[in-house]
Amino acid sequence: MTRSEVVLVGVDGSAASLHALDWATAYAHRVGWSLHIVCSYSLPSFTAASLDGGYAALDDSTIQEGAKSVLAEAEARVADAGVHATTEVATGDAAGVLVELSADYGLAVVGTRGRGGFTERLLGTVSSALPAHAQCPVVVVPLRAEAHRGVSWGEAASPDVEPTGTSGAGEIREVRRIVVGVDGSPQAERALQHAIAQATAWGAELTAVTGVPVGNAGILAWLPSSVDREQVLADIGAGMDVLVDRYEAQNPGLRIRRIVLDGTGAELLTEFSTASDLVVVGSRGRGGFRGLLLGSTSQAVLHHSACPVLVVNKHCQD
């Protein structure tokens, strides 16, 4: 097993981070990877003011024991998953720690919102900073994704198992439907490559989406009235077909649904997230006429997606 066949997971004991751990465990189980679970903390100079108006010094060993307790809970959560897991207590800013570690891992997974208190705010700040700077793809799992379907560890080996309802500890979130944003940029093409890898790993359906705002307030509003906007959409769709056809030819048996719609990339991907199990985006698209999808879009999707989001940024190592 190579170093890259390991999923890096940031936890802090919050419900959000544990749901992210569930997703990471499901993926690792599916592809035969292992997990490396990290809880990081920063030691503040002082805690809250004491009753006498002074400040109580915060002992490093107390915080470290708290982090170890978080990791023990995480280990217990994945104990029956059939996935090898290691843990690490790291000192430092959570975002910085995970960004630095990401160079050695094939995938990083975090949740969208963490806790305050003795651990550094892992989720929230981290769920924005890590996708932007990590050296591997990052999956951000929203807390509301807990309502997604799941199957037990024992059923996970069969791709034909039907969903059994709400996921929890010891359950796998099946990924059956994946949507990827495509806008013709190199980063979007890399996102498509990773989406194909995810679809192959999960045995999932894959849909490629391009958004083109053609309404009165859209980018194409400047076009003369004589221009057929439907033809513009068709022409952009033809460009998508050239790209997608190439990847289908390279992956026998792969079929990618293609959709070109009126709207921004953020709007469309967020809407599609309500009926999908994973959204895949690049971190930055092209400017001008086709700068519709990535960059600000990836941030918007991260904030509003109803399902996990995989972000492929420009720093990701091939």
Image: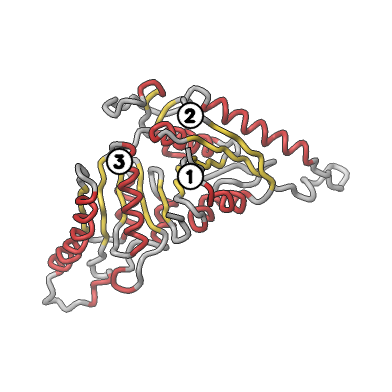
| Percent coordinates x, y for residue 80 in the rendering | 49, 22
Identified at 83% across, 43% down, the residue is 56
- Identify the secondary structure beneath mark 2: loop
Mark 2 or 1, closer to the camera = 1
Compared to residue 228, the image places residue 271 above or below, namely above
Quadrant position of residue 60:
top right
Identified at 63% across, 38% down, the residue is 88
Identified at 35% across, 57% down, the residue is 190
The dot on residue 200 is 3
CB under 8 Å between discs 3 and 2: no
Q: Earlier in the sequence, mark 3 or mark 2?
A: 2
For the question of whether residue 275 can be seen, the reply is no
Mark 3 or 1, closer to the camera = 1
Q: Is residue 61 left or right of residue 315?
A: right
Mark 3 → mark 1, Cα distance in angstroms? 18 Å
8 or 126, which lies in front? Answer: 8
Mark 2 → mark 1, Cα distance in angstroms? 15 Å
The kind of residue on which mark 2 rests is Val
Quadrant position of residue 197:
top left
| Percent coordinates x, y for residue 260 in the rendering | 21, 58
The dot on residue 83 is 2
Give the position of the C terminus as an image quadrant. bottom left
Q: Earlier in the sequence, mark 2 or mark 1?
A: 1
| Percent coordinates x, y for residue 49 in the rendering | 80, 46
